[in-house]
Image (cartoon, helix red, strand yellow):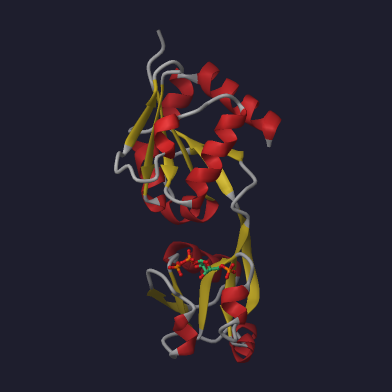
Amino acid sequence: MDRYLTFALGKGRLANKTMELFEKIGITCEEMKDKNSRKLIFVNEELKLRFFLAKGPDVPTYVEYGAADIGVVGKDTIMEENRNVYEVLDLGYGKCRMCVCGPESARKLLEHHERIRVASKYPVIAKDYFANKKHQTIDIIKLNGSVELGPLVELSDVIVDIVETGSTLRENGLEVLEEVCPLSARMIVNPVSMQMETARIKDLVERIKTVL
Ligand code: PRP
């Protein structure tokens, strides 16, 4: 019989959406639905599948090393982590945008290519955008959350962050100044798994495509 295919799912909203999607193609994992459980790994014995939840930024790591064959994680994390994995499918949910945001007054700093301070949870994406797309020298300040505080307390001139509904920006007097790229949930695959389990993985991808 087949070996287990292992999935690493980014914890939280994305994981729930992913399990909903899998259910539509008959892949269920009942024990994963118990909200009170502290269990980390869930198994579907009939289908020979294993699932585990991980912090988003760790998902590409598990997949690169082959600890998981397949991962589901945001495009933001894939770009930031830069791991050796194949991105095989855009799942279409978790849609949002990576943007340069700040007060309206910061717009001229961007236009004049001034040396600015950029706060972000995504230093790799921010550096890449300003260096390669804008040819602008910046100072990066790495934050771990509530990045919108940066310009409010004058830690930074602008931020590079995820914008979904835009309400966090609106409620804090900030706006989108430039769009870096669109984001959504993606499926990634370990390159060796792709070779060894081509048929199973391709079949899974095709079945998911029919319900997207
Ligand atoms: C994300 C993101 C923004 C916010 C955008 O933060 O970093 O702060 O959501 O959503 P909106 O456009 O719908 O307001 P998250 O809630 O993940 O927490 P964090 O600030 O700790 O990163």
Residue at far top of view: 1
- At horizontal 56% and vertical 47% (from top left) the residue drawn is 185
Q: Position of residue 182 (x, y in %)?
A: 64, 58
Q: Eyeballing the image, is 144 above or below 27?
A: below
**Left or right of 121 on screen, residue 132:** right
- At horizontal 49% and vertical 53% (from top left) the residue drawn is 79
Q: Eyeballing the image, is 32 above or below 28?
A: below
Q: Quadrant of residue 34?
A: top left
Q: Position of residue 134 (x, y in %)?
A: 60, 72
Q: Eyeballing the image, is 137 above or below 109?
A: above
Q: Is residue 87 in sight in this rendering?
A: no
Q: How many marks?
A: 0
Q: Position of residue 38 (x, y in %)?
A: 29, 43
- At horizontal 61% and vertical 26% (from top left) the residue drawn is 25
Q: Where is the N terminus found, in terms of image quarters?
A: top left
Q: Where is the C terminus found, in terms of image quarters?
A: top right
Between 4 and 113, the residue placed more toward the observer is: 4
Q: Is residue 82 in sight in this rendering?
A: yes
Between 62 and 10, the residue placed more toward the observer is: 10
